Image (cartoon, rainbow, N blue to C red):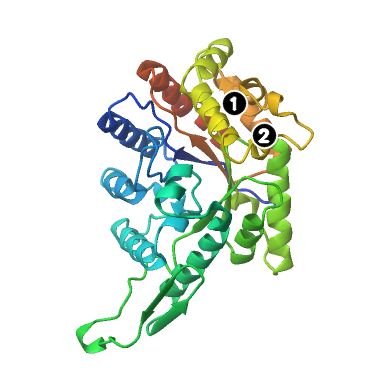
Amino acid sequence: MTNELAPLQFGMFVMPVHDPAKPLTQCFDEDLELAQRCEEMKFADFWVGEHHSSSYENIVMPEIFIAKALGFTESMRLGPAPVCLAYHHPVHVAGRLAFLDHLSHGRLNVCFGPGAIPTDLEVFDVDPRQSGERVAEAIDMILKIWTSDPPYQMEGRFWRFRIKEQLDPEMGLGTLPKPLQRPYPPVFTPCISRGSRSIQAAAERGFFPISHHMISEEVLIDHWQTYSAAAEAVGREADRSEWSVSRNVFVADTTALAEQLARQNSVGRCIEYILELTNRGPGLAMWKRNAEMADGDCNLDYFMDEVVIAGDPPTVVRKIKELHRRLGGFGKLVLVAHDWDDRSRWSRCLELLSDEVIPALRLA
């Protein structure tokens, strides 16, 4: 197993979670401004979520957001996280992502997942018990499109398509777009649960894992053990530098102020929103440290104490280094974007990240 690590890289994930009372245009403008700031800070990756029927998580098509952000970024890679494959025909997904890869001049990352907003599942008539199968089937079809030529005929349980009878090479009819990056852009998989089949499948296919920002260190350790074992089983050598770990990070001039603000501002509200949404659906087990943890203990206090990284610059640097050491290393720290409920405080957070935290970690 490869343990040699390149210097720590950084990413940003815009879920997003915004104040529903804030005008949509302002939400999107601030998210785009954040993309520009991340480019200036030389972030490696910028990720954007997809949701269709939520007033909190309000970016409907991340590919359109990314297309606009490409115009004022030059080196940062951008990607949807995830493309909710359960909702979309694979031919459509394959075509629009191939198109976007060319527009990006090969700066596109791809993350595939199922989606989880209950009303999104309802509006697209998706049985959540079938989401995993739908995603797996869609991935097979998308990769087939990207790595082969017509004629096509694929008959799945959920999706089907063909291009055979109407092929006309002389007129250029029947060709489905291929990405600029060959055989296709880097593919990432969101990781939440212990020992999940999706982590194993990612390792088998050579996809890269991104571990969720709400999970404990115990579960993070399990993620890498599961991923590396599955890779080894198919003759692949897992490389820790390709593992992305996501975390909520808030920096202020003093640790006491950072902890107070993170608990009270959009960081704390985001965590409480996710907890309440999960509690109304599948339950809190997915966010617990372990099976022995009681529901009542899976609360904001727990996340502030054990998961969120808040403090002054030296404290944040120390906590990130400790996380990196305890996990045995990872390649990218993906920060989570939050609503700018207090622009001056968030601007100061970004300044401290840019001027003190990130330089110290890059030199470590």
Q: Which mark is residue 309?
A: 1
Which residue is nearer to you in this view: 12 or 89?
89
Above or below for 85 versus 340? below
Question: Is residue 295 left or right of 351 when viewed as pictured?
Answer: right
Q: Quadrant of residue 168?
A: bottom left
Q: Secondary structure at mark 2?
A: helix
Q: How many marks?
A: 2
In which quadrant of the rendered image does the N terminus lie?
Answer: bottom right
Kindly tell me whether residue 198 is visible in this rendering.
yes
Give the residue drawn at x 57%, y 30%.
Answer: 275
Q: x, y (%) of residue 290? A: 75, 37
Left or right of residue 301, residue 86 in this image: left
Q: Are marks 1 and 2 in contact (CB under 8 Å)?
A: yes
Q: Amino acid at mark 2?
A: Leu
Rendered-image quadrant of the C terminus? top right
In the picture, measured across the screen, residue 307 lies left or right of residue 82, that is right
Q: Earlier in the sequence, mark 1 or mark 2?
A: 1
Dot label at residue 323: 2
